[in-house]
Amino acid sequence: MKALSFIRSRTTVLKHENIDTDRIIPARFLTTTERKGLGRYAFNDWRYQADGSLNPEFELNKNTSQGCEILVAGRNFGCGSSREHAPWALLDYGLRAVLSSEIADIFRGNALKNGLLAVVLKESEHRYLLNHPGIELSIDIAECTIEMPDGGRFRFELDAFSRECLLQGVDQLGYLQKHLPQIEAFEAKREAMA
């Protein structure tokens, strides 16, 4: 997992509400535990036409969305079944952050554990971003702020553990492994006292 402290990117917008994990990556592509390559299946049934060609009407296929690392999605993003493949697919596709007024808890947890910033915004902030696709945002993970092009800022909440893991570029296991000497010292002290 790469350390993530700052994201500066234009936004791409999917206004659809209730985008579930099967829409993010259909179940038929969950045949691997490899993360690499899953990006080609992200939003598969919207991105591709029946003949396999790109759907020119789908927002992420438009030139204005190319290179965008921030997705502004409709309310209730990531609902449905739990699958880590969903954030894996979005990361492999090139997204680094998902912003919405409501993000399903399990999806948000999976996203944060895998290095995808999932931010819940106030309704008014979310509405503004939905209505202004393509604006450039600067997201500071340490400060939990999103800076707008005019210098205005939105604040967002991120629990301390998730923020620390994102900043260090580690998952839960990696976090524990970084503290292995302290854990071993504690266990040795505990055994000596027994």
Image (spheres, helix red, strand yellow):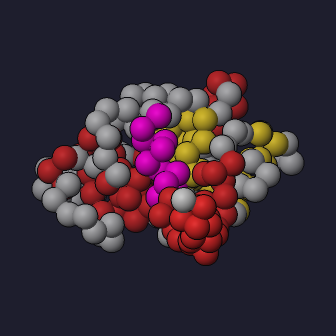
Residue occupying image coordinates x 69% and y 48%: 160
Instruction: Please identify the dominant SS of the magenta region.
Output: helix
Q: Is residue 31 above or below residue 3?
A: above
Front one among 148 and 105: 105
Q: Is residue 10 above or below residue 13?
A: below
Q: Position of residue 123 (x, y in %)?
A: 65, 24
Front one among 23 and 193: 193
Residue occupying image coordinates x 86% and y 48%: 151
Q: Position of residue 145 (x, y in %)?
A: 77, 47
Q: Residue furthest front?
A: 194
Q: Residue furthest right?
A: 151
Residue occupying image coordinates x 69% and y 39%: 157
Q: Position of residue 179 (x, y in %)?
A: 61, 69
Q: Quadrant of the C terminus?
A: bottom right
Q: Is residue 178 above or below residue 165?
A: below
Q: Is residue 15 above or below residue 158?
A: above
Front one among 89 and 104: 104
In magenta segment, residue 24: no
Count of marks overlaid on the render: 0
Describe residue 175's horizontal placement relative to residue 54 as left or right. right
Residue occupying image coordinates x 19% and y 46%: 27
Can I make out residue 92 in this image? yes
Q: Find residue 61 and report its image quarter.
A: bottom left
Q: Magenta region: which residues?
A: 105-116
Can I make out residue 67 in this image? no
Q: Position of residue 192 (x, y in %)?
A: 58, 67
Q: Residue furthest top?
A: 123
